[in-house]
Amino acid sequence: MRTHRSMRRSGALAATALSALLVLAACGDDDGGDDTASGDEPSAEAGDFPEGSTMAELAEAGEITVGTKFDQPLFGLVGPDGTPVGFDVEIAKIIASELGISEDNINWVETVSANREPFIQDGQVDIVVATYTINDERKQLVDFAGPYFNAGQTIMVLESNTDINGPDDLAGRRVCSVEGSTPAENIRTNYPEAELFPTGAYSDCLEPLRNGQVDAVTTDNVILSGFVDQNPGEFKLVGETFTEEPYGIGLELGDTEFRNWINDVLEASFEDGRWEQAWEDTAGTVLDTPEPPEVDRY
């Protein structure tokens, strides 16, 4: 059952209907439409999906609430207009478009590593697309579609640092990472001689690294690559990746129908070029374009 989701939306449906009437009145004879991640006007309707499904509910509501990061260059970073931009954001737009929801009707909610599961469980978001690593522990709390990208944990240090070249050099060092993240847990479990300096967001690690409060920052390579690109001459990545971090889309536990549908959308985007375009418009401005991963239909 999706009681929490239905309750949250029931009050929104009337407002959505009123908004739709106002939009129609304002548009008049305007033949234009909102741009979407796919470049086409969304055309799906509630009747296109099984009755009672999450897809039908979202299509009928005409809006979707997406949790994403607000502080991660290339994947989820709030832009000058207050709207997040990045690869995760574009993936969410592709999903919304397939539900007939334009990007103007996506409600973006900031999620940090520690609150992603609670936000899904409490119905505060419909999906989370937020550099969200799929793992067995999290699968006990939420479902995952994907992966849509494979990352790996690495290390960022000051440009001038020559002492740290990989995880084995972290012994006796202070290492910043985000509480509730898989990289932080990996340091605790597998590199206990390092001193973990936990924060709420990866951007909170930058100033401690600058002022020598910590010796290194660790998380996924693509996240750190964004910080290196954003702060030229200050930071660098060292060593190779030392974990595998498959990024998935988090959704309510047990909603297999919705999970399978999102997997179908992802696979279609791999084939028709939308995934590649989303990458090249965002993370691809800094990083090489990878091959899309194989979806895990567990």
Image: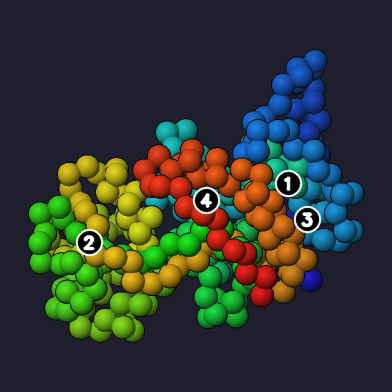
Few, some or many C-alpha atoms within 10 Å of disc 1 (few <14, some 14-19, many ≥20)? many
Q: N-terminal of the two: label 4 or label 3?
A: 3
Is any atom of residue 278 visible in this view? Answer: yes
Q: N-terminal of the two: label 2 or label 3?
A: 3
User: Which amino acid does the dot numbered 3 rest on?
Assistant: Met
Quarter in which the N terminus is drawn: bottom right
Please name the residue shown 24% across and 44% down the image: 231
Q: CA distance from mark 3 to mark 1?
A: 9 Å
Q: N-terminal of the two: label 1 or label 2?
A: 1
Q: Is residue 215 above or below residue 235?
A: below
User: Which amino acid does the dot numbered 4 rest on?
Assistant: Asp
The residue closer to the viewer here, 54 or 226, is: 226
Q: CA distance from mark 1 to mark 2?
A: 40 Å
| Label annotation for residue 238 | 2
Q: N-terminal of the two: label 2 or label 4?
A: 4
| Label annotation for residue 98 | 1
| Label annotation for residue 55 | 3
Q: Secondary structure at mark 2?
A: strand
Residue 8 found in image quarter: bottom right
Could you say where residue 276 lies in the image, as x and y percent from the top left?
A: 55, 45
User: Which amino acid does the dot numbered 2 rest on?
Assistant: Val
On the rendered structure, is 80 left or right of 63? Answer: left
Q: Secondary structure at mark 1?
A: helix
On the image, numbered disc 4 is attached to which residue? 88
Few, some or many C-alpha atoms within 10 Å of disc 2 (few <14, some 14-19, many ≥20)? some
Is any atom of residue 78 visible in this view? Answer: no
